[in-house]
Image (tube, rainbow, N blue to C red):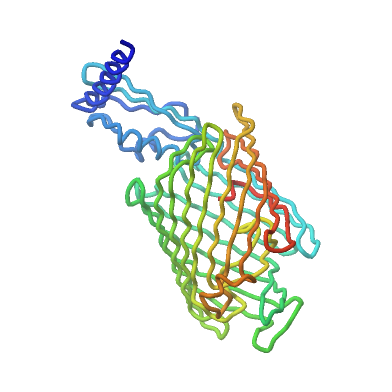
Amino acid sequence: MKKLITILFLFQFVFLAVSQEDGTIISSVTFKGMKKTRASFLASITETKAGEAYSTKTLNQDLTILKRLPAVGHAYVKTNVENGKCDIEFHIQESTTILPELAFWTTTNNRFAYKLGVYDYNFLGRNIAVGGFYQNNGHDTYAFNVRAPNLFSKKFGLGFSHQNWKSEEPLFFDNQTANYLYNNISTELLGLYQINFNHQITFGFNYFQEKYQYLNGATSPQVPRDLKVNKILYKLLYTYENLEYYFHYLDGFKSILYLQYVTSQNDFQDKFIIAWNDFFYYDRVGKKGNWANRLRIGFASNNDSPFAPFALDNNINLRGVGFIVDRGTASIVYNTEYRHTFYDKKWLTIQGNAFVDAGTWRQPGGRISDFWKSENVRAYSGVGIRFINKRIYNAVFRIDYGISLTDNTNGLVFGIGQYF
């Protein structure tokens, strides 16, 4: 008898779901819970409209679109069907999107450094990101950025940035190291176009000037002590995203393809192409677990130059390796970690994680066989902790400690946002 009742209940549920989409017309669509985000903006980027036929698929896609917005920490929907008409309410749990940026650290030459900035990821309540920062690490750096993905329509927007970056960086040649003051002054203009729900492209150019000034270390007649060159970078990004969002949990697949062509006229950096693809896979494990994976495969023109584009660095690919310890013209990196939530209340979540980061590089002017040479392979394993404020966009403070599986190096890595 219980089985019969269960079958009848399931049949009734399916029948109601199907009949709801069969001829049911949407009579009203409302957005509730926002303080800053404009309802008119949310209506402009979603497909669910009054007067159209009800569709569960469209409704679920609109929920995902809303959850992708920096201003939306979480969203859910309520429906009321009566006499062939449906009232739909989107309920928004907004995130704080005006974020200060403050950081202090000590550089490799024991200088005190700091960074001050502020960003608004929901400027005017229309999903516009605007902000900038000032940084002093013994040298003055500043940047200003604007990104408006829905500036002209639901699908088309623009991005603009200007930056004057200075830092002391190592260059590697003839098994030796030299330290240079690196200065990059750039202006970038990008078009942002959403093809459909899963696919989008970013395209544009970056005009920049690079300067290298020798500070100390090894020298070579083949490597200039001072270098200044103007360049133009043409950029194309293709993103495929099929992720499900639930607060700080992710589930699904995402891929980002980066294509860049750089023109320059000098004896040490020819025109070159650089391309890499990031593959992301996330899987929910029970109610409190999240398995996260990133595979990055990248290749560039194989010039025998100390200015190779792929860097081996703490904050980019391998946690614990150090600050720019090597460069290459190709790389394969795999990062995997398990995140587990130990504490989760109204606004604060604390996660622990265990990770493995592994990668290999092709040396400048080298061969594909460089990938499996032991001296080019690095692997790190470690643990970390995350403090997450669920009411503030991207408010994830992370600490990771990585230990090398191939040599004796190790180190702490601090950052904002999940590592990937």
- Residue 209 seen in the figure: no
Residue 15: image location, x then y, percent: 23, 22
Tell me: 317 left or right of 151.
Answer: right
**From this viewpoint, which residue is outermost toward the top?**
1
Q: Nearer the viewer, residue 195 or 16?
A: 16
Residue 46: image location, x then y, percent: 34, 38
**Residue 74 vertical position relative to residue 314 in the rendered view, above or below:** above
**From this viewpoint, which residue is outermost toward the right?**
110
Q: Nearer the viewer, residue 370 or 201?
A: 370
- Residue 184 seen in the figure: yes
Q: Residue at coordinates 57% horizontally, 42% vertically from top-left?
A: 394
Q: Nearer the viewer, residue 4 or 280?
A: 4
Residue 186: image location, x then y, percent: 55, 66
Q: State which quadrant residue 364 falls in.
A: bottom right
The N terminus lies in quadrant: top left
**Residue 376 vertical position relative to residue 383 in the rendered view, above or below:** below
Residue 332: image location, x then y, percent: 53, 64
Tell me: 266 left or right of 383.
Answer: left
**Residue 1 vertical position relative to residue 63 in the rendered view, above or below:** above
**From this viewpoint, which residue is outermost toward the left?**
23
Q: Exactly how many numbered labels are in the figure?
A: 0
